[in-house]
Image (cartoon, rainbow, N blue to C red):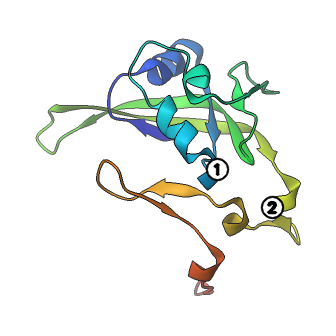
Amino acid sequence: GFSSNSWKDTVANCRATGEFTWNLVTRSLAEAMNASSTTAEVDEFDAAGVEVAESVEIAAPRVAASPATFECRVTQIIDLRSATGEASGSWFTVGEVVGVHLDESLLVDGIVDTAAAEPVLRGGGPTTYFGISADQRFDMRRPG
């Protein structure tokens, strides 16, 4: 799923078509991702300057350069509310994954090496992002 801090084209497209792609944002794609978050009425692929790739199971396009993409069918679009029930203006879209595109170079013994993709994530605040790196990794087994 993904969240949107306003009713943007992406949420409207999800409601209209019932599908979306989730594209992993890597460090090399971070600036393009940021450019795609514009509220201007433009094609977000054009605004971001990224190449489009066709999906297999759905009609929604995907980001060709992303090393991991999920093709999704919308299951819920949730109008996020405050604790008092007031609309927040933000939306959370959830989907069922019906197709996966994964760069095989990320697989190590059949398991995705997350750090190798150099993903980025929001870190609180309007401009803060963090990367995931191998030096931050630790392992722990879940109790039986």
Q: Earlier in the sequence, mark 2 or mark 1?
A: 1
Tell me the crowding category of disc 2: few under 14, some 14 to 19, or many 20 or more residues within 10 angstroms, Cα based: some
Provide residue 125's location: percent of width, then percent of height: 29, 53
Q: Which residue position is annotated with label 1?
A: 28
Disc 2 from disc 1: Cα separation: 15 Å
Q: Quadrant of residue 144?
A: bottom right
**Which residue does the image show at 38% across and 59% down from the upper left?**
123
* Front residue (pair 101, 78): 101
* Front residue (pair 119, 18): 119
The image shows residue 76, relative to residue 46, as above or below, that is below
**What kind of residue is marked 2?**
Leu
Provide residue 65's location: percent of width, then percent of height: 74, 40
Q: Which mark is residue 45?
A: none
Secondary structure at badge 1 equals helix
**Which residue does the image show at 83% across and 51% down from the upper left?**
103
**Which residue does the image show at 33% across and 34% down from the upper left?**
5
Q: Quadrant of residue 52?
A: top right
Q: Which mark is residue 106?
A: 2
**Count of marks overlaid on the render:** 2
Marks 2/1 in contact by CB < 8 Å: the verdict is no
Would you say 73 lies left or right of 93 here?
Answer: right
**What kind of residue is marked 1?**
Ser
The image shows residue 107, relative to residue 88, as above or below, that is below
Would you say 141 lies left or right of 3 here?
Answer: right
Tell me the crowding category of disc 1: few under 14, some 14 to 19, or many 20 or more residues within 10 angstroms, Cα based: some
Provide residue 136's location: percent of width, then percent of height: 56, 79
